[in-house]
Amino acid sequence: MSYATSLYLTGAEIGLSVAGLILLLITAWTSRAAARGITIAAVAALVGALVFSVSLFDGGVGAMAFDGLFRVDAFSLFAKVLIFTATIACLIVAPHYFGERGDYRGEYPVLLLFNAVGMSMMVSATDLLTLYVGLEMSSLSSYVLASFARRDDRSSEAGLKYFILGGLASGIILYGISLVYGFTGATGYEAIRIAFDGNFSTGALFGVVFVLAGFAFKIAAVPFHMWTPDVYEGAPTPVTAFFASAPKVAAVSMLVRMAIMPFGGEVAAWQQIVIFAALASIVVGALGAIGQQNLKRLLAYSSINNVGFILIGLAAATPEGVAGVMVYLAIYVFMTIGSFVALLMLRDEQGNALSTFDDISGLSTTSPALAWCLLALMFSLAGIPPLFGFWGKFVVFQAAVQADMIQLAAIGIAASVIGAFYYIKFIKVMFFDEPKGAAPAKAPLSHWVVLGLSVLVISPLGYFLTPWLGDIAAAAAQALFQFA
């Protein structure tokens, strides 16, 4: 393949990189007053990358770029569309939040742009070195974003915790990569798969385990979830919304591609690990959330819980399972963005966050529209029909049953009932408790637009998307298995 074709296939990444560098220079030469204009330009760049990625989708198996280092196929394009969509939403709601505190600077949208570039590289990587470069590019900007509110001690603490534990996870992944390379003599996914088919030694197994353990940290799966509640609570809410959506999609997609492509011939070596992580994440996420009073910490445990359901689809190790993972991710992005934007709108007249259950008591009386939006989002996260979140759980359980993993599906369904408790607690507090404080302050139009679109997608109207979404997810899964 020619160099020009490789550049074309990486057009989204190149465009975002150039836009990020230009906006970084503008940020350095202008005052904070230009931050909103820089945000608009960053959103425009992401929209351009989104449209370009959609234009590349043809339902085929895709094409390789740069001599096999980078792959553009239906799977990576599906993930990129979700990543860019989530990043755009998080950028739209950020200026008002930081502007109230005088903390908004042009570096914020620039960091999100470079983070999007790293995530885009992660989901398209077909070489361990490309994967690690993309992973670190995303991670380094994430550490800064977590501590972006420099005058907030909790934000600084969240950034430090995320940096230390994230560095540890990156080291684990790098060590696993070195073991895989040592026992295969290759870093390309195809060459690793061929080498494993010929000789899968104990040392190679340790390499696979280390790599998967590092990825488990990135997706906040049990037992590598300990950082999530603290970071989600301490980071600024727009940053938390970003962490719970776009990087989650990128990390899960990276894990799925790694499991199916280079490690796809040794399913038995990693399937039990994934099954354990799935069930443990569902149970720990559900039980951990029950005693929480802080709403952001509760949604952090909800994120861990949802990762467990996603991993059930991967544990099936079938095209149907991978398609279920992608469908779940698509629905999850809108549920998560909507939930955190709703929390972002829970602020009093002085700009202080209404962050506990006591603060939202009687919300249906003081702000009925926001309460009903939160009701829809919580029921959807719980998987209660007819809301669209039910469909995400249904497709992953269906894939597990089709793969003769009926016990896994049954345990997952039973454990999901536990999670319904704390979602329903939202409804009880908002609709049946007496108000204990003033009504939330008026939210800007941008917040209502993002929240409204999210609620619209996860409403019963979302089922009209199922044929189209299912076809694209099936094409994405087939792109991985045709390689395999």
Image: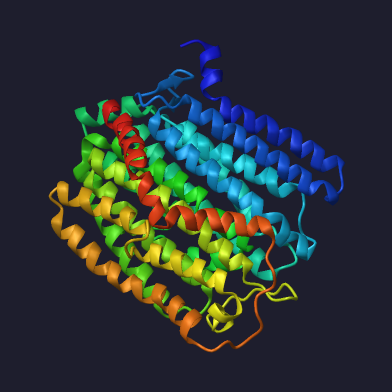
Q: In this view, does 311 lie above or below 415?
A: above
Residue 59 appears left or right of 144:
left
Residue drawn at (65%, 51%), measured in percent from left and top? 92
Residue drawn at (61%, 38%), measured in percent from left and top? 46
Q: In this view, does 152 lie above or below 172?
A: below
Residue drawn at (33%, 61%), measured in percent from left and top? 386
Residue 331 appears left or right of 270:
right
Residue 365 appears left or right of 28:
left
Q: Position of residue 256 (x, y in %)?
A: 35, 42
Q: Where is residue 265 in the image (x, y as percent from the top left)?
A: 22, 34
Q: How is the image coloured?
A: rainbow
Please state which of residues 152 and 95 is positioned toward the viewer in this rendering. 95
Residue 329 visible from this viewpoint: yes
Q: Position of residue 324 (x, y in %)?
A: 30, 46
Q: In which quarter of the image is the C terminus?
A: top left
Specify the quadrant of the image occupied by residue 126: top left
Residue 225 visible from this viewpoint: no
